[in-house]
Amino acid sequence: MKKTILITGASSGFGLMLANSLQQKGFNVIGTSREPEKYKGKVSFKLLQLDIADDASIAAFSQALAKETSKLDVLVNNAGFMVTGIAEETPIEIGKQQFETNFWGTVKVTNALLPIFRKQRSGQIITVSSIVGLIGPPNLSFYAASKHAVEGYFKSLRFELNQFNIKVSVVEPVWFKTNLGHNAVAATEGIADYDTYRRQVNAFTQKGLNEAEAPDAVVGTIIKLIDAKDPKFSNPVGKMTGMILFLQSYAYKMFEGSVLKSVRTAVK
């Protein structure tokens, strides 16, 4: 019997690519979007309305999902956005919005669907995190903090759900060519002391986006996790992940020094 897979944020980026790939492989795919009517006739899978930062939307979505299927095999938490900018220049309200979506929204959607998995005594939760959930680059303080929170939450949740045969994984991509960077919310500039550094770090970040890999590897990793009998919890994806994780574990000060040097020379 084919698996039913729910993917949040399935109208663009990783979510859309994953939904199309799984649909082609014969899975029963249900996606979500804040504005599904915009994509009517443009996607081959069912698209339900969901804003993960809105409690009323989550409640309505849960009811709509129950009408679509009584069985759910996999939840892929993919919806989210990115706040960029110098930490001190970022208004706290924007930082709160980052957490309300990336962390609290992910938690609330997961909690809304856990009763289905517990009743079945089976299921799988795969959450798209980020390599910045493991390290802290400049210009991404609130985004990195939200992904660190996601990592910590699911690290603990996996133990609690093991008794119900519910498998938990996170996927941690490096920079990939999606619309995440282009749709990022930028902090308000305003502190003159950061002017030079801001130009340098923006050039450094843009260089990373320009040289980013195609997103196929992320989609492939998620599909492998869905097919795996015993999926790993942590799944970094990208050409630089090995070096990044080595530096994180054994030489983080070297990494910090390398980033600071790269930022200073990015505009030369």
Image: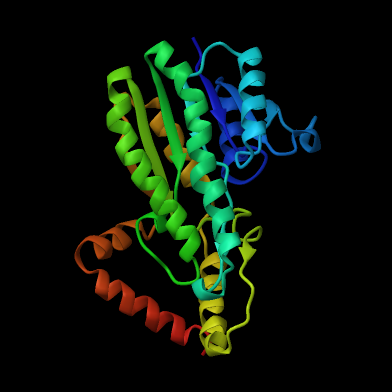
User: For the image shown, how many numbered marks are present on the structure?
Assistant: 0
Q: Please say if 35 is above or below 236.
A: above
Q: Please say if 27 is above or below 224.
A: above
| Extreme residue toward the left, this view | 250
Residue 206 appears at what percent x and percent y?
57, 71
Q: Which residue is nearer to you in this view: 229 or 136?
A: 136
Residue 117 appears at what percent x and percent y?
43, 18
For the question of whether residue 85 can be seen, the reply is yes
Which quadrant of the structure image shows residue 90?
A: bottom right
Residue 242 appears at what percent x and percent y?
30, 57
Question: Residue drawn 54% across and 89% down?
Answer: 196
Q: Please say if 169 is above or below 230.
A: below
Question: Residue drawn 47% across and 45% down?
Answer: 218
Residue 222 appears at what percent x and percent y?
45, 36
Is the image coloured rainbow, by chain, by secondary structure, or in one colour?
A: rainbow
Which quadrant of the structure image shows residue 189?
A: bottom right
Q: Please say if 202 is above or below 217.
A: below
40 relative to 196 in the view: left or right: right
Q: Which residue is nearer to you in this view: 244 or 107?
A: 107
For the question of whether residue 238 can be seen, the reply is no
Question: Residue drawn 64% across and 73% down?
Answer: 188
114 relative to 32 in the view: left or right: left
